[in-house]
Image (cartoon, rainbow, N blue to C red):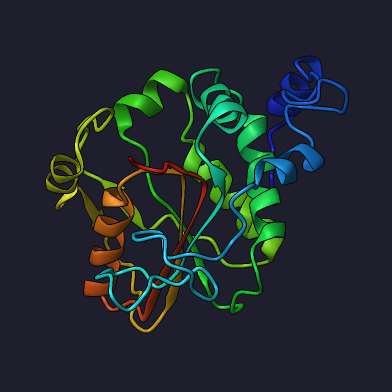
Amino acid sequence: MYISPIESIITILTRDDCLICKISEGPICELCFIDLSEDAVSRCYKCNKLTKQNSVCLSCKSKLRRVWWAGVYGSELKELITQMKLGRKRAIARQVGKYLADNLPYLDQDTIVVPVPTAQKRVRRRGFDHSILIARHFADKKALPYQHILRRISNVDQIGKRRAVRIAQMKDSFEIKSGIDIRGRSLLLVDDVLTTGATLESSAALLRKSGASHVDAVVIARHLLK
């Protein structure tokens, strides 16, 4: 994965200790990331029923086949994601992409890794799209093809919104870039946090409608709703 000379210099000059253990090289060491993966049991992301390979169970309607997450959104994992996005720490996105790749099982080598694009107003504010960085480094570590297929056409803010509102907001929020043919392909969506699943479901619905044979997803954290 190519990193510009300027980014390499910035990374070296701003290198700090692991956010969790404060001992190993940061921004987060592999052992701490593994420790944060507390919800390692394979479950359906929608109803929490035990399933194989993190499959969505047959009782739950979904355009997603399987959804993986490293851990539950809270405490250290929440801080890690906050530092990545609001602290503008690109190094966290790179490391997390590699760690997620190590944690996932084997994927067919023709699986296309696809980032779920962030709203442009947030990209402009932060200076980068964290989902793209995570996806690129995930794909690089897994030796899988990467393609920026989706374009976000909505800038709605979903923070604090109820499930029904989130689902309504995300409908028709994405489009597929022109000239891209995904018919018969298996795709893996990459994002940071799964809350209601509205964003992933909207993306998956569009991809399936456009001919994708299967759509899976992986996120850093799953937000358990009460």
Q: Quadrant of residue 22?
A: top right
**Residue at 72% over, 23% down:** 19
Left-right relation of 224 to 162: right
Coordinates of residue 134 in the picture (x, y in percent): 57, 45
On screen, residue 69 above or below 10:
below
Task: Tell me if residue 177 can be seen.
Answer: no
- From the top left corner, tell me how far across and down residue 176 is, in percent: 27, 59
124 relative position to 165: left or right: right
**Residue 111 makes an appearance in the image:** yes
Side of 181 relative to 41 (left or right): left
- Front residue of this view, candidates 41 and 210: 41
- Vertical side of 13 occupied by 181: above or below: below
Residue at the spot 85% in from the left edge and 28% down from the top edge: 25
Number of numbered discs visible in the structure rendering: 0
Residue at horizontal 36 percent and vertical 43 percent from the top: 195
Front-lying residue, 85 or 31: 31
- Front position in the image: 124 or 216: 216
Q: Residue at x 75, y 28 (%)?
A: 8
Measuring from the top left, give residue 113's x and y in whole percent.
51, 62
On screen, residue 147 above or below 79: below
